[in-house]
Image: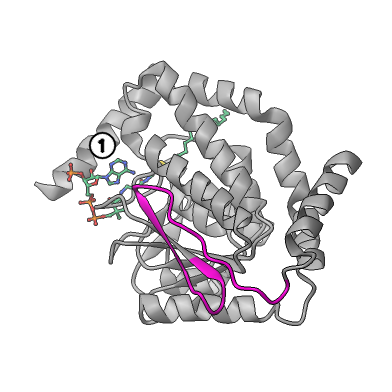
Amino acid sequence: MNRAMMMSAAKNLLTRYGSTKNNIYRCMSTGKLTTVDVNEKSGVAVLTMNRLPVNGLNLELLRDIRNDIDEIEGNKCRGLILTSASSSVFSAGLDIMEMYKPNQDRLKEFWTTLQDTWLALYGSSVPTAAAINGHSPAGGCLLATSCEYRVMLPKFTIGLNETKLGIVAPKWFMATFCNVLPRRVAEMALTQGKMFSSEEALKVGLVDELAQSKEEAIEKCQQFFATFAKTNPFARAMTKQQFRSKDLQQLEDEKAQDLEAFLFFVNQPSVQKGLGIYLDSLKAKTK
Ligand SMILES: CCCCC/C=C\C/C=C\CCC/C=C/C(=O)SCCNC(=O)CCNC(=O)[C@H](O)C(C)(C)COP(=O)(O)OP(=O)(O)OC[C@H]1O[C@@H](n2cnc3c(N)ncnc32)[C@H](O)[C@@H]1OP(=O)(O)O
């Protein structure tokens, strides 16, 4: 983040926090594939993904999440908890149908929206946490690890499994993973396409706590936010942004090249063939 960007971020944050310390704000749900509920007392917003059955991240769901994050930031919420309306899947990651035999204009829009959603979530000045109440592969894991804290229910799986699908996680997926895990653990897991059980994820630090129910997970996320009670919100947000600024700036600088690499990669006949086989294997499971 250069000096001008830092000053502008500081100005925004001062405007937000300057005279509003003890007030509680109400956020409103914006999306059709998401809901946002704000706890009137704590000011914490729960953003629930609701594209059943598996919260596949298609263009529309990503747009809704992105708009919700903007609205939660704008409405001065005290925290953002990301969770799922499904009882078994947090998010199945990117909707593979967006990448398989794609319409090229939509494919561009899809990837650009994913980039923007990540920039908004990873760079959010509002404290963020994920209540991971189901499986969370690939893009689902990206969303969860973009948050500052993770609470997961037992007996599910989480990880970046891209190599198992014959695709490569972009640099910013890797940076997000490395922000949570030791570099060696991250490299091993990414190259292996490893999916961690909830219990394994807790052991390596991919998640921070386990909870027995979604309600308990949300409560634990709220308790995490409460640890900031005695901090200055402006100083907290600036500190977070400085920690993450290198990763954010890298994607900001390379957005166009990243899009180009994605389009080139996804349109390779061998990648299309691999995605087709993977989709068939998913569908065969349900027959
Ligand atoms: C060399 C330099 C390169 C630089 C790099 C540049 C570019 C890189 C290029 C690309 C990067 C892309 C990164 C990709 C990220 C992703 O997120 S890819 C998606 C990965 N996701 C998965 O592998 C998860 C697959 N799904 C599952 O494992 C399971 O569905 C489950 C989430 C564990 C849930 O299981 P269950 O509850 O049993 O549900 P079903 O399996 O029965 O699924 C229900 C229906 O949903 C369909 N489905 C599931 N996941 C997806 C998905 N991700 N996309 C689309 N559709 C999905 C599934 O087929 C079922 O459909 P039907 O009901 O049978 O029609």
Quarter of the image containing the N terminus? Answer: top right
SS at badge 1: helix
| Secondary structure mostly taken by the magenta-highlighted segment of the chain | loop
- Residue 190 picture location, percent across and down: 53, 49
Left or right: 112, with 182 as reference point: left
Q: Is residue 243 visible?
A: no
In this view, the residue in front, 34 or 193, is: 34
Residue at figure coordinates x 80%, y 62% from the top left: 239
Q: Which quarter is ligand 1 in?
A: top left
Residue at figure coordinates x 51%, y 58% from the top left: 144
Residue sitting farthest toward the right: 3
Q: Is residue 260 above or below residue 65?
A: above
- Residue 130 picture location, percent across and down: 50, 65
Residue stretch in magenta: 21-45
Label 1 beta carbon within 8 A of ligand 1? yes
Magenta span contains residue 241: no
Residue at figure coordinates x 57%, y 37% from the top left: 115
Q: How is the image coloured?
A: one colour
Circle 1 residue: 279
Please state which amino acid type lies under the numbered disc 1.
Leu
Say few, some or many: other residues with alpha carbon within 10 Å of mark 1 (under 14 / 14 to 19 / 20 or more).
Answer: some
Residue sitting farthest toward the left: 287
Left or right: 23, with 278 as reference point: right
Q: Is residue 241 visible?
A: yes
Circle count: 1
